[in-house]
Structure formats: structure tokens, C-alpha cells
Amino acid sequence: MTEHMSQTEQQASVISRDDVALVTGATGFIGPRVVQNLVNRGFRRVRVLVRPSASSSETKVLLQQAGQNDLQVIYGNLLSMDDCIAATEDARVIIHLAAGRGEKSIPDAYLNSVVTTRNLLEASLLHRCLLRFVNLSSFSVYANDGRTPGKRLDETWPVEQHPERRGDAYSFAKARQEELVVEYSKKYGIPCVMIRPGWVYGPGNTAITGRVGIGSFGVFLHLGGSNRIPLSYVDNCAEAITLAALVPGVDGEVFNIVDDDLLSSRQLLRLYKRHVRRFSSLYVPKFLSYSLCYFWERYSAWSEGQLPPAFNRCRWNSFWRKTYYSNDKLKKALGWMPIISTQEGLRRYFEACRRKDAHA
């Protein structure tokens, strides 16, 4: 156990080590690290809800990482109210990481992010023992329309009021999920903490973030330029989520998760080409990329959706507007510090990218 974890273990916690801590999405990208964090801190009743469709290898790896004696696995689906009731029984903390990723349609994303979250909240109300609900959201909920120039994007930044305009099912569902959690918190007094990570990267997520550019047109279009990328190495993100679940006195708060020493889009692309593989890219100046998004948006509206609004001004503002980021609140309120440096995180990320390319 690292010195950092030993110090964190000594902090006061909203739950005891014998209380049930439920983690959803435990076999995903971030989930296994959160489970490992809880076990490393000595929590003896960590429970995970795993879909029946999850591969046996995923569950086996999770058990091996955490230690079978420290982990209770419940197989179920968040769309089933009965499964949610069983999973939330005696749960004092719920860390809700499960979300509908990869869905192309807004109805599917809504079903697997919003409806599932409602089921989980409703189930927790039946047991009347929940001390904290931690909801994993996303930077994609921020409007970032340039109305606050010169300011770093922090937790006070306005959220998107019309997420449907972005044309992105995941962003829409995350915005509506947040609204639901806030509604339940106000209506039923559920203590909640909202977590909004930037781009979480590392082994297990080897794609190049769309904040750098897109490769949809036969050539990689570099759109980010000198913009900073809100990097969050997966272990650092998991550490922040765990602290958000345990540290007293932060109910009702929102926390952005970004690392120190953020790179620009141009720097990240250059390093990727150097350490993973070479490929052609074309830089698109901001005035041109914004214009393209504007005309795409207008044509999509004119054609009544025959051309999907995949590129629009809302997405441009979110991904490619020059923005600065802050993790001050995360450090001050939770005592968080990155446990993996950006240099080491990128080394591990590039190594994972090379391994994936070698097996492609």
C-alpha cells in the first residue's frame, strides 16, 4: 500500500469499514480502480452490481484485483427494479459509474443512463439507509459558449440548457441524468455528490479523444490546436471518485476531475505520433472549423434531420473552444492529489496503444 493511500485511510469517512459500499459499472474502465481503492482502504463490504451479460473473464479479473473475500458480486440489470432493490439493500454509499456509452440514439442513451439512475435512486429510498450517492457525470454537460471569457472552466461554469442541440446522445443523457439526481436530492433529501471528469485516459481507453480531432473523413482533422486537453489519468480519476464517496462535509457539491500539467491538443497529437504510430493529419483553423460546424448545423435543420447534426456550434464550443481548466476545488475540499503524473500516465497510455496496434 502506498504512502498516499495510508494517509488517506486516516481521514474521517462518512461510512465505517463494515458498511456496504455499492459500486455500479464495476467492470468498466474506471470501476475496477474504484473497487480496488475501496478495498485498499480497508472497506470489507464492497458490493458490485454486474450485468449478467458481463464476460466471466471481466468478473474474474475484478475478483482477482480486489480479493474475493472483500467483494460481493451481484448479477443484475439496472433496468430491473427488483435487481436494484437487491443491490441497494443496506448500502450506505452508492458510487454510480454505470452509464450508457456508445449508444447512437438519444432514446437508448436515456434508457441506459437516466432510467437506470432513477431505478437506483428509487430502490435506495425503500431501504432508508443511504448516506451518500456519488454520480459520475461528464464535462460534456458544460455549455462553454464563451460568455465568460478569460475564466477557467470550474464547477461554477453554466451547464448546457438545451443538450439536445449538441446532437450527441451521451451528452444529452448525462445532462438529464444530472437533473434527475438533483431533483431526487432536493425532493427526498438524498445526499449526493456530482463528479465531472474531463477526458479519462489510460490502458483500457486507447482512442484519441475527439478534443484533438476526428478521423471520419479519410484523413485525421486536427481541430484542437493550442487548446488544453482536460486530461485525467484513470487511476487519478478513480482516486477522486473514491474520495468524493468518503470525505465528510461535501454533500451537494460538484467536482471537476482534471490532472495537473495539462497538454495542448497539438502537444498530445505530436507525442502520440512519436510514441505510437505515424499518420497524416491536417490542421483546421478555428474560424474554418467553426464555420463548418455552423453550416452543417444549418443544413441539418433545413433538411429536417436527413443530415444528422453531428457537428454543430454547441459541440464546437464544448470540444474545440480555447478553454482553461481548474482542479482547485478537488484539491481543497477532498484533499486530492494526482497519484500518477501526466508523464507517467502518458507513458502507460502510449504503451497500451502500441500493444493494441500490434494485435490489430
Image: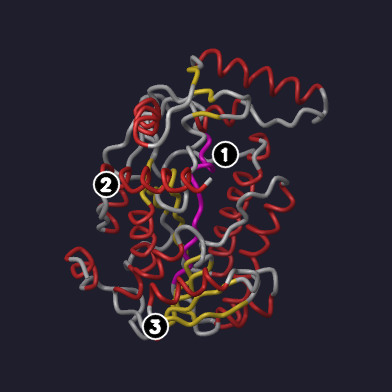
The answer to whether residue 170 is left or right of residue 36 is: right
Q: Give how far across and how far down residue 43 sits, in percent.
A: 34, 79
Secondary structure beneath label 3: helix
Q: Residues within 10 Å of mark 2 (few under 14, many from 20)?
A: few
Residue 202's place in the image compared with 150, above or below, is below
Q: Is residue 276 magenta?
A: no
List the residue tagged with mark 2.
344
Q: Residues within 10 Å of mark 1 (few under 14, many from 20)?
A: many
Q: Nearer the viewer, residue 5 or 115?
A: 5
Q: Which residues are magenta?
A: 132-143
**Which residue is pictured at 61% across the width and 58% down the height?**
180
Q: Nearer the viewer, residue 135 or 205?
A: 205
List the residue tagged with mark 3.
70
Give the quarter of the image for residue 237: bottom left
Label 3 and label 1: CA atoms lie apart by: 40 Å
**Which residue is pictured at 38% across the width and 53% down the height?**
234
Label 3 and label 2: CA atoms lie apart by: 29 Å
List the residue tagged with mark 1.
160
Q: Earlier in the sequence, mark 3 or mark 2?
A: 3
Mark nearest the camera among 3 and 1 is 3
Secondary structure beneath label 2: helix
The answer to whether residue 170 is left or right of residue 4 is: right
Mark nearest the camera among 1 and 2 is 2
Q: What amino acid is at disc 2?
A: Glu
| Screen quadrant of the N terminus | bottom left
Residue 15's place in the image compared with 291, above or below, is below
